[in-house]
Amino acid sequence: MPEPLVFHFDVDGNDFTSAGTASVTVKKNLRQLGLPSEVIKKLSIAMYEGEINMVIHADGGTADVIVGESYIDIILADHGPGIPNVELAMQEGYSTATAQIHSLGFGAGMGLPNMKRYSDEMTIDTRLNEGTTVKMRIYL
Amino acid sequence: MESYEHSVLLDRQKCTGCTTCLHHCPTEAIRIINGHAVISQNRCIDCGECIRRCPHNAKRAVSSPLEAMDRFRYKIALPAPSLYGQFNNMDDVDYILNGLLRLGFDDVFEVSKAAELVTAYTRQYMKAENLPVPLISSACPVILRLISLMYPMLEDNVLHLLPPMEVAAQLARERALKQHPELKPEDIGVCFISPCPSKVSYVRNNFGGYKSQVDEVVAMNDIYFRLLDIMKREDKMLSLSDSGMSGISWAESGGESTALLNEGYLAADGIDNVCKVLEEIDNGTIQHVSFVELNACPAGCVGGVLTVQNPYIAKARLRSIGRYLPLALNFPPAGTDGIPKQYLFGDMPSYIPAARLSESYIESIRMMGEIERLRSTLPGIDCGACGAPTCRAHAEDAVRQGIKTVSCPLQQTGQREEKP
């Protein structure tokens, strides 16, 4: 097995229109590896949701994708406000996004639930006023 | 695949190796080698973007001369609706259709007529259950090639109905045989008057498993001035035009989908926009859309590289031509139900998906690691001076060829520092 591939992205918090660009780049790379389209789809949705979350709630952050032999990890880290109640945030339809975000068609309260649905394992490490790190793993 | 005949060619005398086409090719099919653009036959989708962009007119489309039709006893013209938008002060389509007869055709069959039927059949098609969502229009051959090459996971979403040009060709042949029982099928020649080169390769390559019923594709800009001359002399006209507003509107982006009278549609035009929409469809982020119309050319077929007029002017003209026409004049024969089998197609064009680095996943990871390593040594400004469209593509070319180092012209001349 060669070294795992690592893709690193800075997710810009100010730019709503470019949110989701990291997941598009990752998708193109994964296609070149010949991964099945179901895996790519799961991964890109999970990652896209995470990216959007960081833009809406945390003023951006970083995204790392680690491609190994039997799994792919996505690590999303931000220095945002943290999630006060993870259980509540995991509920479908629960959202703290502003009206302005809603008017852009986001903030449906499906971000974290979708991330969980489309990944095989997910852990959330969050500290109030310090930031949040979400790790997702998808097995191949 | 090896014998695939493309319709975009390069004039080496005119090509200066300037890199303009390199940066605009949506499939990164072009490299500049020894000072000239070289198009990869495996990656070219005949979109004509390089023809549109080339500042030196070094790229041209292959099409047939009108004289190629001389070998047929009975010649039928199939004008694309975009042709109607090419003429100034032209308020009646019959001027054009009569002009085509004067040019030597024995019959004219409007593609817009067939477009109205395709619309009716699409409505039927969409009534079926368990259809993939959204359905993607099959009318633009470039889009089908793009999907096969870059988005093979969306092949199932493509509407497997033949484009209006093919339906028109079938109907025109049927009509000719009925009206002229003395004709044998091989006496009849069908000539499509095309706004774009992609129809040329579509017809010449027996698209997917389907054998095209069109014999020759003539470029709109080849026929334009001859037609213009003849049209001016026209005084007595036959009443030939038989299509409504909806059929004619297929010439512009949004025409096909609005004709469906269906709420949930999306229409995108221009190859970059199309790629973005395909990405979104793959992501599953497009909601409440059941039909997607995609046109490779800006503004739709009126923006094809073989047209004469500015696409937006052509669009405005089509609107004024269509204003007082009924919505549609062509419908499936009364009492019939279902879509005739001969209007459906089976296979998509066969491309080897471009993306894949190696058959082996492990080897692909190794190669991509190497690509990333090489790329990080390059300046990352995607100038094209090395002949590849981006630094990433340059690194990928090297790894695919088994080369361990990359050479950057800017770093060699000291204009950019070499990165460790």
Image (spheres, rainbow, N blue to C red):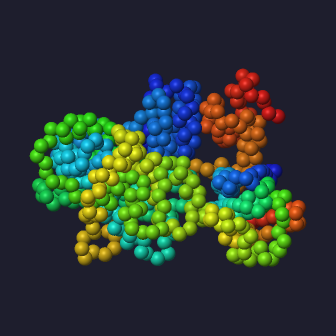
Question: Number of callouts in the render?
Answer: 0
Q: Position of residue A70 (x, y in %)?
A: 77, 62
Front residue of this view, candidates A113 and A42: A113
- Residue B50 position, x and y percent, is 49, 38
Between A111 and B170, the residue placed more toward the observer is A111
Q: Residue A84: x and y, percent?
A: 84, 71
Q: Looking at this view, is B231 or B134 the one in front? A: B231
Q: Is residue B414 left or right of residue B224?
A: right
Whether residue B344 appears in this view of the structure is no
Position of residue B384 relative to residue B137, above or below, is above
Residue at the farthest top position: B413
Which residue lies at the image location 73% right of the left edge and 39% below the top edge?
Answer: B375
Q: Is residue A61 left or right of residue B279?
A: right
Measured along the vertical axis of the image, is residue A132 above or below residue B144?
below
Query: At 49% across and 36% down in the image, what residue appears?
Result: B53
- Identity of the residue drawn at 57% across and 38% down: B23
Rendered image quadrant of residue B338: bottom left
Which quadrant of the figure contains the C terminus of chain B?
top right
For the point 57% across and 32% down, the residue is B19
B86 lies left or right of B151: left
Residue B245: horizontal and vertical position, in percent?
Answer: 30, 59
Residue B181 seen by the camera: yes
